[in-house]
Image (cartoon, rainbow, N blue to C red):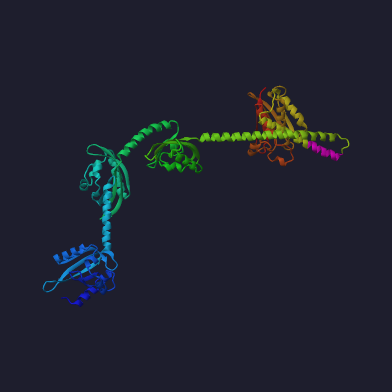
Amino acid sequence: MPNNDDFRSLFEFLPIGAYRSRPDGTQVRANPALVRLNGYDSEAELLAAVRNIAHEWYVDPARRALFVQQLERDGQVTGFESEVWRHKTRERIWVSENAHIVHDTAGQVLFYEGTLEEITDRVRERQALRRSQQQLQQVFELVPGVLYHWAMPNGGPALTASISPRVKELFGVEPEATLRDPMLLRRFRHPQDRERVEAEIAAATRERRALDIEFRIVLDDGTEKWVHQTSSPGPPEEGAEVRVGLLQDVTARKRAEIALRENGELWKRALESTGDGVWDWDLAGGVEVYSPQCKALYGYSDQDLPNLPEALDELTHPDDAGRMRQARDDHFAGRTPAYVNEHRVRCKNGQWKWILSRGIVISRDAAGRPLRMIGTHTDLTAAKQAEALRLERDRAAAADQAKSQFLSRVSHELRTPLNAILGFAQLLDLDPGATERQRGWIGHVLSSGKHLLALMDDILDISSVQTGQLPTMPEHLSLRVVVEEAWAMLDTAARQAGIEVIDEVPPGDALAVRADRRRLKQIVSNLLSNAIKYNRPGGWVRLRAKAAGDLVELSVADSGPGLSEAERARLFTPFERLGAKHGPVAGTGLGLALSRQLAEAMGGSIEVESEPGQGATFRVRLPAG
C-alpha cells in the first residue's frame, strides 16, 4: 500500500485537481486544487460534504456509471469529459478526468486515483463553433444563389474549397464535380462575355478588391441564363489567396429590363421629339435614368450626372425643394392623379433654370407602394422670364401712369393760385407809388412766378405726352420760319451772353417739315436756349439743316464744355441737370426730356453727339413736309 506521505507530497503541488476515492464514490483524499475547484476552503470540508458522488457531482448521473464501466473494463480512463456541479456553489462546469484503479497485493480494488481539469471555456468555445458551423451550413443551403469559397495557391490553379448545393439548380452540375474540377464553371460562360468576365475577375483578384459583375451562361442543353457574380477577398489560408462569393440567377430581371428598355425607348423617343427631357425612376432599385436630352437641359453630358434620384434633387433650389417633394409624396400616396410641379434647378454653369416636372406612377406593389415612375422635364425659363418682364412692365407702366396723373393734377391745381399771384404782382408793378426797393421785390415775385408757371407747363406737357393725351396738329411748315420765330425770343439773351450765332438754315421753303407749329417751336427754343445758357463766354452756336431721305434734320451745335458718356446717358432724364442745379444758370431739367418726347410724338427723334471739351451737337429729325 503506498505511503500516505508520498501521496500528500505528490498531490500538494499539482495545478489541477487530484483525488483518491473508493468504488462506492466515497472521497478519501483531495488535493488543494480539487478543493478550490469545488468551492471549498479545506480538504476536510470537502470530504465531509460529499456523500454520493454520482448524484452530487455529475449533472448527468449516468456519466458516473459510464466512467466506472470504462475504468473497470480498461483499468484506466483518459480525457473523460463531463458536465459537473461545482459542489459547494452548484455552478455547472465542464471537466476532463483521467483515472486508474489501485489494487492490493491480492488483486482486490482498493480505490480509484485520478486528476480533474476544468475545461469549461474550451467546451463552450467548441460548442459555439459547432453552432456557428451549423448555422453557416443552413445559410449555405438556404441562400437563393450559389455560395462558393475558392483558394488559389501562389503559382497554382484555383481550388474550390466549398460550394453550396444550389450550383446544380443554376448550372446543372453536382457540387462534387466543381470540387474535383475548379475550372468547370468557366466553360458555361457565354462566348461573347467570356473575355470580359475573365479580365474583370483577374483584375479583382490581382488588386484584392470586391468583384461585382453580370454575364450570361449557356447550359449544356442550350439554355441561356444571366448570372450576377459578387465576391470579396478573404483571409489567406496557408499562403493561398482566398475569395468568397455568390452567384445568383438574375435571368428574369434582365429579361424584364431588356423588354422594359425596348418599350421605354419608344415612348422616350416620342416624348423627346417635343423637346422635353425624359426620366424613368425605379424606386425599388434606387435608380433614376435621365435621358441625354434631360441632362443636356442643365448643361450636363451623359457622364456628368449619375442616374440616381438624388442627382437632380440636390440641384433643386432650396426654396423650391420642399414643395417639390410634397407634390411628389402626394402623388405617391394617391392624393393626386399625377405629379406636377414647377421648380428651379441649378445648371452646370451655376445658373438657375425653371422647369415643369411632370410624372406618373405606372406600377405599384400589392400594398400600393410605388415601384416605377416616369415623367418629363420642360424648360420654363423663357416663359418665366417673359412673365416677369411683363409684370415688371405693367407695374412700371402703372406707376408711370399714376405719376403722370399726379403731376398733371398738381400742375392744374397750382396754375390757378399761381396765375392769381402773377396777376397781383403785375398790378403792383404798375403802381406808380412803389419804391425802387419794392419794385425789386415785385420783380423777384414775377420772375419766380413765371419760372414756376413755365415748370408747370412743361410738367403738363410731359404728362400729356406720356398718357397719350397731348393734342398735336401736324401741318406743312417752313423750317426757316420756325427757326426765325425761336430766334426772335432768344436773340437778346444771345447778345447779352456774347454768343455768336451762325445761322446756316436754308431760306424760304427750301426745307419743309410736317409737324405741330407750337411744339416744333418749343423744341427749337429749348435747344437754342440750352446752347446759349451752357456755352462759354464768347462762344458760338451754329444751326444747320438738310434733307435726309423722308426726314429733315436740324442740327444745333455749340462750343460749350461738352458731355461725357455718363452724362449723355442721363441727359434726357426728367429733372436731370447734370449738376447745373448748383450753378448760376436757372432751369428745371425738363426741357430736353420734353423736347425728345414731343419730337417722338410727331414721328421724329432727337439725338446728341458730344465729347468733353468739344461742345455738343443736337440733331432733330422730323418727317419731311
Q: In this rendering, would 77 be left or right of 134?
A: left
Residue furthest to the left = 106
User: Residue 503 at what x, y percent from top left?
Assistant: 72, 28
User: Residue 515 at what x, y percent from top left?
Assistant: 69, 25
User: Residue 338 at what x, y percent from top left?
Assistant: 45, 35
Q: Which residues are magenta?
A: 435-447
User: Residue 243 at what x, y percent from top left?
Assistant: 28, 50
Residue placed at 85% from the left, 39% from the top?
Answer: 438
User: In the figure, residue 421 lies in which quadrant?
Assistant: top right
Does any portion of residue 291 appear in the rendered image?
A: no
Magenta region includes residue 438: yes
Does any portion of residue 484 appear in the rendered image?
A: yes
Which quadrant is home to the C terminus? top right
Q: Main secondary structure of the magenta part?
A: helix
Say if 400 sits above or below 109 in the image: above
- Near-viewer residue (279 or 296): 279
Residue placed at 63% from the left, 39% from the top?
Answer: 566
Which quadrant is home to the N terminus? bottom left
Residue furthest to the right = 433
- Near-viewer residue (361 or 537): 361
Magenta region includes residue 551: no
- Near-viewer residue (98 or 39): 39
Q: In this rendering, would 366 be left or right of 379?
A: left
Q: What is the total number of numbered labels drawn onto the structure image?
A: 0
